Amino acid sequence: MSGLKIQVDEVQRGIVRIELEGFLDAHTFEDFENVLEDLFRQKKYRLMVDLHKLRYISSAGAGVFIGALGTCQDNVGNIALIHPSPEVKEIFDLLGVFHIFPIVTNTEEALTVLQS
């Protein structure tokens, strides 16, 4: 399996866009956790995560999202998931993850969700 590529940009004051590309699994989930922990140290709790280039996510990867959501919500934030790839959507559906995250199709919709 390939690795995970992570790109982070602040799109608006206090709102961060994270793009994931590749595979989020037992070998790469700690990289994503480290990025999130760094954002939390900076008091960034409103996150949009673009998943359209993510080809695979394991239960370990999904667990990172669930843990991060709790931290965000405890700090009046949230995580919006942008355009999950079909592969990721299938796994999230199986795990029931889609019921706890706002799912949007683009950055503008994510901004609307995170600003409310």
Image: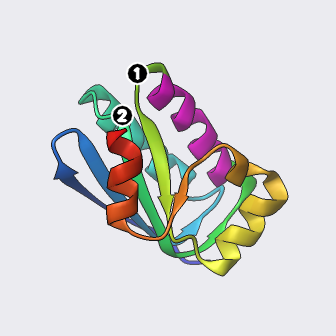
| Lateral position of residue 4 relative to residue 99, left or right | left
Q: Which residue is mark 2?
A: 45
Q: Along the line of sight, which residue is nearer the eye, 29 or 19? A: 19
Q: Name the kind of residue labelled 2 in the image.
A: Tyr
Q: Residue at x 36, y 34 (%)?
A: 45
In this rendering, does residue 35 appear at all?
Answer: no
Q: Give the quadrant of residue 88.
A: bottom right
**Residue lying furthest right in this view?**
94
In this rendering, is residue 77 above or below 1? above
Q: In x, y percent, where is residue 84?
A: 57, 70
Q: In x, y percent, where is residue 27?
A: 60, 58
Circle 1 residues within 10 Å: few <14, some 14–19, many ≥20? some
> Which quarter of the figure is the C terminus placed in?
top left
Q: CA distance from mark 1 to mark 2?
A: 7 Å
Q: Residue at x 39, y 56 (%)?
A: 110
Q: Residue at x 45, y 30 (%)?
A: 72
Q: Give the quadrant of residue 25.
A: bottom right
**Residue lying furthest left in this view?**
13
Classify mark 1: helix, strand or loop: loop
| Lateral position of residue 43 relative to residue 91, left or right | left
Q: Which residue is mark 1?
A: 75
* Circle number at residue 115: none
Q: Are dots 1 and 2 in contact, CB under 8 Å?
A: yes
> Which quarter of the figure is the N terminus placed in?
bottom right
In this rendering, does residue 103 appear at all?
Answer: yes
| Lateral position of residue 57 relative to residue 48, left or right | right
Residue 13 is one of the magenta-drawn residues: no
Q: Which residues are magenta?
A: 61-73
